[in-house]
Image: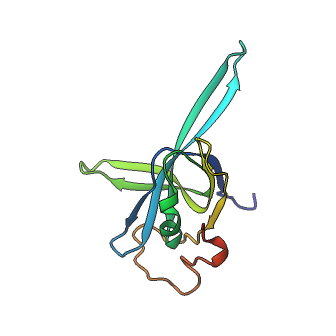
Amino acid sequence: MAGSYNRVILIGNLGRDAELRYTPSGAPAATFSMATTETWKDKAGAKQERTEWTRIVLWGTAAEAVSKYLTKGKSVAVEGKLQTRQWDDKNGVKRYSTEVKADRVVLLGSKEGGDGQQKRHDAESDHEPGDDAPDDGMGRGHVDDDSIPF
């Protein structure tokens, strides 16, 4: 095998408003949950449905730029990579969380009909939780005019 490839593309609806937080070093991070629903007909012809909930994390200036637009019910497309975090809870038990570290978010409108406008944002999301390094001057966290969602 020549290597591996970690890439995720999801299209779905936000389950709640995005939450913008800052790390102790001041790095912005937006988190939100996203529902993707699969429908099919079973052997009897009855419609079946299954919804998967996925946690999404968007880092840097991209998080600040789009967090106010990421509200419950909005339809979005997210592109990024799967990432699993590990931590010890208050009782010392190891916990794990798998999430999508987004590097592209496209607002598609709202589930309730929306305005039909598409707003795209590409993120340079190389900043990891706990990474206290300042911007390296090589585009980390950079947002150009073409990627601003308004």
Single out the residue that lies furthest toward the bottom: 137
Residue 22 lies, in percent from the top left, at 37, 68
Relative depth, front residue between 55 and 116: 116
Q: Residue at x 29, y 51 (%)?
A: 89
Q: Which residue is drawn at 58% across and 85% down?
A: 138
Single out the residue that lies furthest toward the right: 2
Q: Residue at x 60, y 66 (%)?
A: 149
Relative depth, front residue between 146 and 130: 146
Above or below 66: residue 17: above
Above or below 18: residue 134: below
Residue 83 lies, in percent from the top left, at 53, 56
Report which quarter residue 129 is drawn in.
bottom left
Single out the residue that lies furthest toward the front: 115
Does residue 21 appear anywhere in the picture?
Answer: yes
Report which quarter residue 51 is drawn in.
top right
Q: Residue at x 39, y 70 (%)?
A: 130
Picture quarter with the N terminus: bottom right
Above or below 107: residue 43: above
How did the renderer colour the structure?
rainbow
Residue 14 lies, in percent from the top left, at 52, 47
Picture quarter with the C terminus: bottom right
Does residue 78 appear anywhere in the picture?
Answer: no
Above or below 149: residue 117: above
Residue 134 lies, in percent from the top left, at 44, 83
Task: Say whether residue 96 is left or right of residue 117.
Answer: left
Relative depth, front residue between 73 and 143: 73
